[in-house]
Image (cartoon, rainbow, N blue to C red):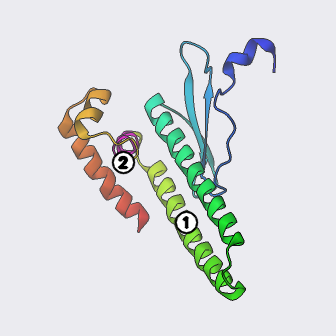
């Protein structure tokens, strides 16, 4: 990359992500006065999409990745500790099978949830993420979005109904 383009490099450090993570985050023009935030993903049909998203949504997905990384590290530590334990081999194998099944189920549920969220219309997706992953209430979201609290409430209600349909 040329020296003049260093401002375009995503300043976030490369991090390990779950192999089942259905999206990739990146920024363009991170060091400029107007950075752009993007999410890239493949839909259920394998078509790749790249969408520009608002900074608060980008930050929520970024935090979600960090939380996922924490979970992966805890799982690694747990597996390392178990290898050092004195559990008999046959019991240890049964624990490993159960742990692998639970991890696989959690990954499938997480992937299905991510895919369903990405299928929501932009406003529903953004408000749902701000509410559930950002920990904001209707009033705070309304202030950020410049709309009424009842509009946010209605959007969240519709988003939840749509999520239920998508996850069936």
* Viewer-side residue, 107 vs 149: 107
Per the rendering, the mark at residue 132 is 2
Q: Position of residue 47 (x, y in %)?
A: 63, 50
**The image quarter in which residue 136 lies:** top left
Rate crowding at label 2 as few (under 14), some (14 to 19) or many (20 or more) other CA atoms within 10 Å.
few
Residue of label 1: 108
Q: Which residue is pictured at 68% across the width and 47% down the height? A: 16
**Element assignment for label 1:** helix
Residue 92 shown left or right of residue 51 in the figure: right
Q: Which residue is pictured at 32% across the width and 55% down the height? A: 160
Q: Which residue is pictured at 68% across the width and 21% down the height? A: 8
The tag earlier along the polypeptide, 2 or 1, is: 1
Q: Which residue is pictured at 62% across the width and 73% down the height? A: 100
Residue, far bottom: 90
Q: Position of residue 120 (x, y in %)?
A: 42, 49
Let me know if residue 53 is in the magenta part: no
* Viewer-side residue, 148 vs 21: 21
CB under 8 Å between callouts 2 and 1?
A: no
Is residue 51 shown above or below 96? above
Per the rendering, the mark at residue 153 is none
Residue 135 shown left or right of residue 47 in the figure: left
Where does the magenta region start and end? 123-131
Q: CA distance from mark 2 to mark 1?
A: 19 Å
Residue, far right: 2
Quarter of the image with the C terminus is bottom left
Residue 86 shown left or right of residue 121 in the figure: right
**Element assignment for label 2:** helix
């Amino acid at each position: 990359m040329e020296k003049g383009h260093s401002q375009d490099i995503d300043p976030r450090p490369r991090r390990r992500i779950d192999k089942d993570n259905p999206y990739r985050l990146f920024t363009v023009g991170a060091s400029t006065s107007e950075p752009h935030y993007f999410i890239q993903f493949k839909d259920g049909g394998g078509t790749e999409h790249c969408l520009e998203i608002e900074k608060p949504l980008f930050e929520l997905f970024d935090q979600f990745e960090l939380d996922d990384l924490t979970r992966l590290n805890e799982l690694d530590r747990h597996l390392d500790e178990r290898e050092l334990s004195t559990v008999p081999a046959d019991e240890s194998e049964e624990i490993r099978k159960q742990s692998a099944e639970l991890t696989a189920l959690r990954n499938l549920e997480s992937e299905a949830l991510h895919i369903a969220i990405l299928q929501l219309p932009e406003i529903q997706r953004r408000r749902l993420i701000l509410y559930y992953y950002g920990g904001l209430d209707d009033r705070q979201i309304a202030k950020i979005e410049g709309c009424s609290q009842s509009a946010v409430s209605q959007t969240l209600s519709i988003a939840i109904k749509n999520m239920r349909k998508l996850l069936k």
